Every structure is written in structure tokens, then in C-alpha cells.
């Protein structure tokens, strides 16, 4: 017989792993309803699978990029829109020091797994650097500010934009500047087909 202070492990496992409530990080958050084991599959990121062009049109129709946080990019180039037939997973907040990770399975479904033991009442989080192709203006940076509170917080949920680098000119050693005797090259065979 189990005492009231130590719940039956089988009963605890039967409890849903999570619940949604207000978060101090941002809006709603997802919290552990019970202790969650490392590597445990917590929840599927559900929603309608759509093309990126449809996702862009939906974002524009809703007044901007802010609902991009419900979009989850897939390896096939499509997007899961958690705001369209989605579930509670869309409320998991970003953190620069996450306790969960999102993994795309071979069938294209996304599941959230615990990275380490998560105690009851702890907020679930994963890192989702958002890709925003427009200019990262101060207003956009404020709109996507990270409030996770981690010691290594980057201050933004936006993924860094790839930098365009100018090609570096390699210095040529003086020995290579000396004239070289001309060589005759035979044409190479061309593969047909």
C-alpha cells in the first residue's frame, strides 16, 4: 500500500505529462503535470501541414510575422501550423537553456522529448530559433524578444541571419608570381549520355 505522500508510480505515469497555464516567460506555457523522465516523449506538435507559401499568406493575413511562432518547419519544406487544428504543444515557450527538444520522426511528425528529468510544475521549453526573412528591425527584435531568463539568454528568439561574406583575397607568394614554362594540355574525353 502506498502512502498519500508517495503516489503509486503507475498512477503517476497515467497522469497527463503536461498542463497549460499562464507563464511568466510569455503568454501561456506548458508545465509538467508530473515528473517527466529524461528521453520521455511528452507530446506531439500537432497541426495542419501546409506549404511555406500558404504559411506566408496566413502570416500576412493575420497582420504580420507574430504567428510564425506556431509554424514548425519540416524537412520536406512544408510547415506544421500549430494554430490550425493544433494542440497544447504550440504553447511550449522558447528557452536558450531548454529542458526539451523537438524531433521530426521519419514519418514527418514532430514530437517533444524531455532532455533531462523535469520536475512536476516546471515549465517545459525548447529552443526554436525563428527564421524571419525580413529585416531584423528594432521593432521586430522587440516583438521576438526572448524572456527565458537563462544565464546564456541570447535576448531574441530569432535565428541569426546568415552573413554574406565578401570573398577573401588570398595573398600570392612571390615564388608563384614568377613565369612558368608553358605546358600543352591534351583535351580530356567527354562522357556522352
Image (cartoon, rainbow, N blue to C red):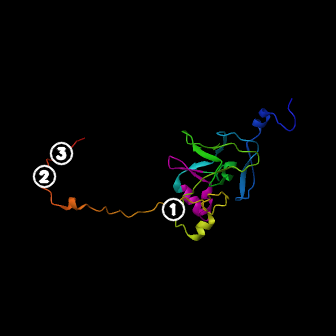
Nearer the camera: disc 2 or disc 1 = 2
Is 73 drawn above or below residue 61 in the view shown? above
- Circles 2 and 1: CB atoms closer than 8 Å: no
In this rendered view, identify the residue nearer to me: 66 or 141: 141
Quarter of the view holding residue 70: bottom right
Q: Quadrant of the N terminus?
A: top right
- 2 or 1: tag closer to the N-terminus: 1
Q: Which mark is residue 188?
A: 3
Q: Which residues are magenta?
A: 54-80
Is 53 drawn above or below residue 118 in the view shown? below
Cα separation between marks 2 and 1: 49 Å
Quarter of the view holding residue 168: bottom left
**Residue wearing tag 1:** 133
The reply to whether the magenta stretch includes residue 87 is: no
Q: Which mark is residue 141?
A: none
**Residue wearing tag 2:** 183
Taking the image as shown, residue 182 lies to the left or right of residue 116, namely left
Taking the image as shown, residue 107 lies to the left or right of residue 22, namely left
In this rendered view, identify the residue nearer to me: 172 or 169: 172
Circle 1 sits in a helix, a strand or a loop, which is it? loop
Taking the image as shown, residue 85 lies to the left or right of residue 175, namely right
The reply to whether the magenta stretch includes residue 72 is: yes
Q: Position of residue 10 (x, y in %)?
A: 77, 32
* Extreme residue in the top direction: 1
Circle 3 sits in a helix, a strand or a loop, which is it? loop
Amino acid at each position: 500500500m502506498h502512502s498519500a505522500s508517495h503516489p503509486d508510480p503507475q498512477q503517476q505515469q497515467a497522469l497527463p505529462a503536461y498542463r497549460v497555464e499562464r507563464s511568466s516567460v510569455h503568454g501561456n506555457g506548458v508545465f509538467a503535470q508530473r515528473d517527466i523522465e529524461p528521453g520521455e516523449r511528452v507530446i506531439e506538435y500537432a497541426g495542419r501541414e501546409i506549404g511555406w507559401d500558404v504559411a506566408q499568406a496566413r502570416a500576412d493575413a493575420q497582420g504580420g510575422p507574430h504567428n510564425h511562432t506556431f509554424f514548425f518547419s519540416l524537412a520536406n519544406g512544408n510547415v506544421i501550423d500549430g494554430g490550425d487544428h493544433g494542440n497544447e504543444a504550440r504553447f511550449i515557450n522558447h528557452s536558450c537553456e531548454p529542458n526539451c527538444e523537438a524531433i521530426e520522426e521519419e514519418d514527418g511528425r514532430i514530437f517533444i522529448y524531455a532532455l533531462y528529468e523535469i520536475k512536476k510544475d516546471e515549465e517545459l521549453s525548447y529552443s526554436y530559433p525563428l527564421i524571419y526573412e525580413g529585416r531584423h528591425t528594432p521593432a521586430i527584435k522587440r516583438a521576438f524578444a526572448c524572456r527565458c531568463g537563462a544565464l546564456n539568454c541570447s535576448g531574441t528568439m530569432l535565428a541569426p541571419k546568415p552573413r554574406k561574406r565578401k570573398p577573401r583575397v588570398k595573398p600570392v607568394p612571390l615564388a608563384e608570381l614568377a613565369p612558368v614554362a608553358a605546358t600543352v594540355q591534351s583535351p580530356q574525353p567527354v562522357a556522352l549520355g
